[in-house]
Image: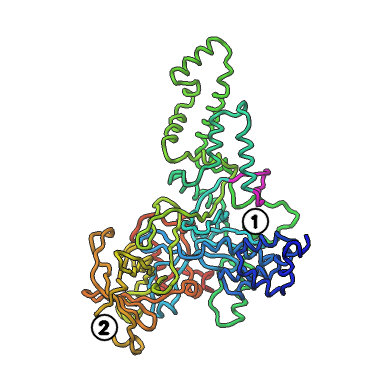
Amino acid sequence: MLPDLCGSSLLLALPDDIFSLIARSLSPRDVCSLGLSCRDLHAIVASDKVWLAQCDKLGFVPCNTLVEWRKGVCSYKALCRFLVNIHPLIGIWVHQNPELGNVVYVMPGFLSVVGCRIIPQEVGPLGLEEGPILWTPVFEILCNYEGSTTFFLHGRERGVDYVYPGLLKSVDRKSNVLLLEVEPRHQRNVGKLAYSKSFAHDVDKEVSRRLSRSSSGISKSQRLVGQKGTGINFSRLGFGDRRRLLDVVTSQTRLNIPETANSMLFPRVRNDECDSKWDLAVLYERRLLLLQMYKRGNGNHDLKPGSASPLNPTVLGSSEVCKSLDCTSGYHALKAGDAEQANYPKGKTLSGFLKNGLKQILGKSSSTYGNRDFQKKNASSCNSKHVQLHEFLQSGDMIGLSLRASTMKLSSYRAWPNMHDSRFALYKLPVRAPKACHEYAGLWGGTFGWPPGRPSEDKPGKALFFILISYEESEGQQLLIATKILEGTSYVLHPNGSAMFVVNIDQPSTDTFPWGTDEDSNHIDVKQSFMGEGIANGYGFRYPGSKPGSLFIIQNGLLVFIWKESRAVLTLQKLNLADLLRKGERVPSLSPVSNFAYLTKTYSNVFSGFSNSSNALSSPRYASL
């Protein structure tokens, strides 16, 4: 098609920089559509300048970081595909258990995103900004050369660090739940898993083909199981079966991390440019090694190109898993029952016809007596909301670990989501960006006491609190709500989701700030103060009491809430978690499934061995962090 006929002559005449600037106002989908409208436009739209502008517009990482990342992918378009796919994962994810705090921050790594758990801890003598914050890796998602994703779960077993490969499934644009699941998959060829983009379409087509066969060779129960198997969701299994499956898959697919791939997960804060370049070089090699491990199941660089590749390390055969979980009896009973039902019409004698007809009238069949136990289990399964494990395993040739980001309808109370207590899931915290009249919204951190973060002689460290500040309108009043999401005590005092204080920003406080100077003898200037109520001891965790107090906005960016009666002081400062983690100190992880979602109800610090930086259990491999 000629340019003047397709209406693209004006765009084609523009310089590349101007065209990239115009294309920046379009979405990635619109840019792709523009490239399909004309052959000449397709060549221009495919340029790196256009897709660099698209990557930069996402605001995921600075432009100079995008230039570094480009060295590891085939094009900026591939990089943009990765960024658009994982962008909804960036942010703070939480779980109700342990009640001290289960905060996972998903942040950019190097051509990757990394989920880091913040350990409940104390603030040491160096303070929150200078002292290293303790964290541990939960999962990471790498970008490969073509821009697709590679998922690794992190965990530690018997003192050894492992990664557990899997697939990143669909990521909803507004996802609020992150689910760790086991997914049945289909094998197109023996010994090889289908990796094509049309994988899901091929599977659906194959299932439809099987279900559309004549019933002469397949019994009704087999067809029903097949139909259910194609639609069985992991969440339909009972909690015990889901836990067993996750444990089996992680134990069989784990990969030992070489020392060279376990040094760092993201660039550190560096003052020297040479050190920064060295970090990038290490991260680049680490990424290549992990991608090779994902593909081949090991870190051996000496594999010959012509040698046969081992089976995909991310999957297990369903039949082998079924045997290991001892759920084959249901599978074989189902097959036996179907075989007898298939042979049932073949009786041709009069006595056989009358016998079978009588049994049918009485509600019995010849297969009932041979499979009574299975029929009882099957009947109870039909009446139960959970499916049987062998039915789930039948729905695919292989199973593997998967991470799925979905959107669920969740209720919340004061910005804290109400969570399912039996799902291996993390829930996204709705952190709002500051705006006019809501300028204090976001994540804050601090300690009890004044001056802020300064330890005393009898207490060298103070418990670190993470507070989410949100706004809510109630009965015509604008309320500022400070919700606790993490505390660094040894035993929980305020469960997750507790409102540490609530103030009415339309009601100024008449109280005066009790100190005139800070820890450096600088004059304190109070910008604003509001009346409110702070949490107090009450009847258990469900019904905490509240006592009056005041919130003071200090000129240097601090928020200070003071309880009027007890004179207790909670001092908060705005946090940049990404910077704190880059300066932080890594500690060992839990076992893989618990490391993702710790579902056991507990009020103590399950990370008590790592409660502060002075006694953190660090190994030589973490020393460089």
Depicted 389 relative to depicted 179: above or below: above
Disc 1 + disc 2, Cβ < 8 Å: no
Q: Is residue 385 left or right of residue 17?
A: left
> Judging from the image, what secondary structure is the residue with disc 2 in?
loop
Q: CA distance from mark 1 to mark 2?
A: 62 Å
Residue 306 x/y as whole percent: 76, 54
Relative vertical location of residue 297 with respect to residue 214 in this rendering, above or below: below
Tag of residue 400: none
47 is within the stretch colored magenta: no
Q: Quick check: 371 above or below 518? A: above
Which mark identifies residue 514? 2
The x, y position of residue 77, in whole percent, is: 66, 64
Return the x and y of residue 495 as percentages of the image width and height: 33, 62
Magenta segment: 185-198
Q: Earlier in the sequence, mark 1 or mark 2?
A: 1
Q: Toward which corner of the image does residue 101 lie, by quadrant?
A: bottom left
Work out whether residue 581 can be spotted.
yes
Q: Give the label on residue 295, or none.
A: 1
Residue at 64%, 73% in the rendered image: 21
Disc 1 is placed on an element classified as helix
Amino acid type of the residue that numbered disc 1 sits on in the rendered structure: Lys
Q: Residue at x 56, y 55 (%)?
A: 168
Q: Residues within 10 Å of mark 2 (few under 14, many from 20)?
A: few
